[in-house]
Image: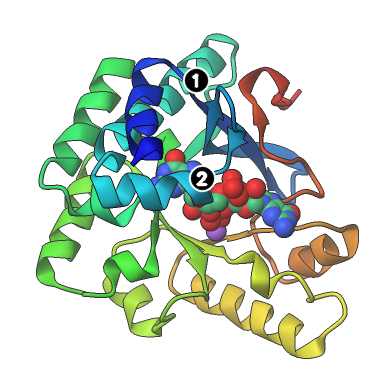
Amino acid sequence: LALESALHRALAREELVLHYQPLVDIRAGRTAAAEALLRWRHPELGLVPPADIIPLAEETGLIVPIGEWVLRTACLQHARWREGGHGELRMLVNISARQFQDKGFTAMVARVIADTGMPAAQLTLELTETMLMEGSERIIGVLEGLRALGVRLALDDFGTGYSSLAYLKRFPIDELKIDRLFIRDIDRNENDAAIAEAIIKLAHSLGLSVVAEGVESAAQLAILARNGCELAQGFYFSQPVEAGQFVLPS
Ligand code: G
Ligand code: G
Ligand code: MN
Ligand code: NA
């Protein structure tokens, strides 16, 4: 409960911060996008990771105002990048289940885009399989409403949820992010390499672009390049960093 009220105050006290991790266009060898990742600078606990924030924020409903703050802050950061001549960068923002279920979600996204002048095509919302699992017409309607705003939709952590291939076909999504669990051993385990290759092929056959998460080595990157994976993200390139440390493409 103490943490809950502290989190409530964190928003007002400007203790929440976003870090940004680059997504690199493998073929061009160039940063093409950034994923915004939430951190909480707690006055006593230090930098609190999202694993300790998001579940609490979801339970209490605080995720709704926090999620709006995340989206707005990421879009304002993108405005600075545009001013600096880096409007070509895309911004990826994680969306939680509770946020997605909120009736006002699409309207909120539309409002933030309008307020910040964010080019909708440069904004990608990251959703997870479990959020879509219900598979209802209502969910498809929400996805289509978001797409009508011009934003792109990505399926995050692919492979860790139900991974029903039927979802991929039914949902109007643009991009697949392969979870880092499936990338970790691709350079030393033939089965893992085969699975990654199959996911990439499947995604492409459905017209989706692919991001490999958790890329930590040149060997992993080489395999992904060979399989035509478009984007890579991971410690091999950069940890998530403050906006000021983010290396813009030259
Ligand atoms: O940055 P880190 O690896 O600790 O993030 C762990 C997870 O927390 C991410 O995979 C992501 O799903 C989630 N996360 C990070 N930032 C946000 C955010 O702003 N909103 C939501 N809903 N989830 C986030
Ligand atoms: O669930 P989501 O994919 O949004 O989470 C991204 C998280 O993954 C970030 O919090 C980041 O800290 C973590 N991450 C990013 N790159 C790597 C990596 O190369 N290796 C590992 N182990 N974690 C990573
Ligand atoms: Mn993510
Ligand atoms: Na992920």
Q: Which image quarter holds the C terminus?
A: top right
Question: Which residue is drawn at the image coordinates 14% and 72% (left, top)?
Answer: 136
Q: Which residue is mark 2?
A: 50
Above-or-below relation of 196 to 58? below
Q: What amino acid is found at the position of numbered circle 1 in the picture?
A: Gln
Residue 194 in the image, given as x and y percentages of width and height: 71, 86
Q: CA distance from mark 2 to mark 1?
A: 19 Å
Residue 163 in the image, given as x and y percentages of width and height: 44, 80
**In terms of image quadrants, where is residue 198?**
bottom right
Q: Identify the element where label 2 is drawn.
A: helix
Beta carbon of the mark 1 residue lies under 8 A of ligand 1: no
Q: Which residue is mark 1?
A: 77
Q: Residues within 10 Å of mark 2 (few under 14, many from 20)?
A: some
Q: Is residue 88 visible?
A: no
Residue 105 in the image, given as x and y percentages of width and height: 19, 42
Q: Identify the element where label 1 is drawn.
A: helix
**In terms of image quadrants, where is residue 216?**
bottom right
- Foreground of the two, 93 or 204: 93
Q: Which image quarter holds the N terminus?
A: top left
Side of 63 where 29 appears, left or right: right
Q: What amino acid is found at the position of numbered circle 2 in the picture?
A: Pro
- Foreground of the two, 48 or 18: 48
